[in-house]
Image (spheres, rainbow, N blue to C red):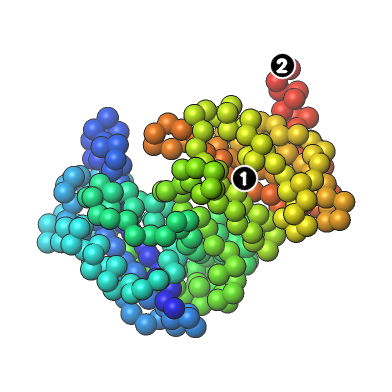
Amino acid sequence: MNFIVLDLEWNQCPTGKSDTIGQLPFEIIEIGAIKLDEALAIQDSFREVIRPQVYRTLHFKTREIVSLRSIDLENGRVFPEVILEFFDWCGPDPYFCTWGPSDLMELQRNMAFHQIPNSFPFPFLYYDIQKIFSIRYEDRRTRRSLESAVDYLSIPKEVAFHSALSDAHYTSLIMQHMTRREILENSSVDYFHTPQQRKEEIYLQYPTYAKYVSRPFPSKIQAMKDRVVTSTPCFLCRKNVPKKIRWFSSGSRNYLCLCQCEEHGYLKGKIRLRQRSDGKYYAVKTIRFVTPEEAEAVAQRKDSQHNKSRV
């Protein structure tokens, strides 16, 4: 097995959102990757600068962050050529790792724009090392920058950040401070392709929580009327446990609830409603165990939301 640690740099429309192409808000201009073996030892690297075909002038924010120059881009190869070579370099059945949740989404968006067949599996699971770093070292919610995580682990900073290959390299070094089991137990779901029908809905179980991804619904209201979306099973004993606090809005697209399993204790449910490119909505539900203090915080949140609605 191989872990492929991927990092991308991308450009956006230099003249603003009004001129942005909806199918391609970010155009990839550099791919960097490190190949690790199953022992997390570095085996190989990949780097290519990509000549942009849509946004040919660098946005001012891109110029501030990325070390590439216009002449570098002019000498690069086009995306369809590079991406096919990259997948060949990855080898069969790679385990993709990234720092944060964005890179694989933008990679697939660029592939779709260039009409390159998408051979990623469904559901497509990958490993967000930024998230796993928080699980391993912090509170599961904090999301550090890559450089901050490097400083935390006292990893020598021998090359500059914000190059695709250097950022992939630093992510690889962070992974070497983790165990393979810690990484593999904490996969993330890519949402570029989501379930189209009930039988495709995604159910995943992790050490401390469970995740569910629904089929699409025409509206948020219809999503929250679906019995599967709003069900609250205990993921250890599989029983559908009663709600102590029913689902309530915690923002325009977020909902919370509180349940109590007689055998295993309090569970907090959270639903995020996400909108697809076709305007429909799908639900991402997580159910996790919480302490009595965290359960009380959910109750206080409900009271706060109730008081706001009365004002």
Q: Which residue is mark 2?
A: 311
At x 34% / y 60%, what residue is drawn? 119
* Quarter that holds the C terminus: top right
Tell me the amino acid under the disc marked 1. Answer: Lys
Quarter-of-image position of residue 5:
bottom left
Up-down: is 95 above or below 290?
below
Q: Is residue 156 visible?
A: no
Residue 285: assigned label: 1
Number of numbered discs: 2
Q: Nearer the viewer, mark 1 or mark 2?
A: 1
Where residue 192 appears, as percent x and y from the top left, is 41, 48
Residue that lies at the very extreme toward the top in this rendered image: 311
- Apparent side of residue 267 relative to residue 255 in the rendered image (left or right): right
Tell me the amino acid under the disc marked 2. Answer: Val
Instruction: Decide which of tag 1 and tag 2 comes sooner along the chain.
Output: 1
At x 44% / y 69%, what residue is drawn? 95
Up-down: is 137 above or below 234?
below
Disc 1 is placed on an element classified as strand
Judge the density around disc 2: few (<14), some (14-19), many (≥20) Cα neighbours within 10 Å.
Answer: few
Where residue 290 appears, as percent x and y from the top left, is 77, 52
- Apparent side of residue 228 relative to residue 72 in the rendered image (left or right): right
